[in-house]
Amino acid sequence: MDCELLANLGKLHTTPLGQQRIRRNLRLDVADIVGWCAARIKASDDIARQGKNYYIGFAGGAITVNAHSLTIITAHMTKGVQQDGD
């Protein structure tokens, strides 16, 4: 897949509040939220850009990334699925 997001995964980042939001929404207990999200994005076949954001689907959830700044905005679980920290 030719995707600017995948080509720039090393620039992916989030804010401290973004980390808290992602941990809470996905019920994660991992230290490296950006690394966790990057791994899900890299493995995903469901990446779509709509306007200013990328929407990435993965087994059990979705991640939203700002296309210009490559900031992970949020992530959430899909209904009925609980994530673990891997």
Image: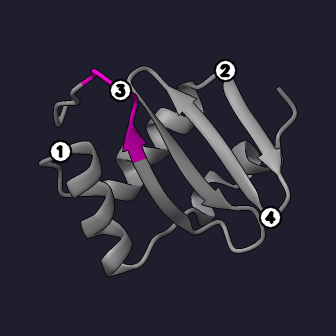
In front: mark 1 or mark 3? 3
Badge 2 is on which residue? Answer: 45
Q: Secondary structure at mark 4?
A: loop
Residue range in magenta is: 76-81
Under mark 1, the amino acid is: Arg
Badge 3 is on which residue? Answer: 79
Residue under the point 32% across and 57% down: 22
Q: Secondary structure at mark 3?
A: loop
Q: What is the crowding at mark 4: few (fewer than 14 residues within 10 Å), some, or many (at least 20)?
A: few
**The N terminus lies in quadrant:** top right
Q: Earlier in the sequence, mark 3 or mark 4?
A: 4
Q: Quadrant of residue 57?
A: top right
Residue under the point 43% across and 46% down: 37
Q: Earlier in the sequence, mark 1 or mark 3?
A: 1
> Compared to 41, does 13 lie above or below?
below
Under mark 3, the amino acid is: Lys
Badge 1 is on which residue? Answer: 27
Q: Give whichever of 43, 61 is nearer the camera.
A: 61
The rendered magenta stretch, by its main secondary structure, is classed as: loop
Residue 4 in view, yes or no? yes
Q: Give whichever of 69, 60 is nearer the camera.
A: 60
- x and y percentages locating residue 69 in the rendered image: 69, 74
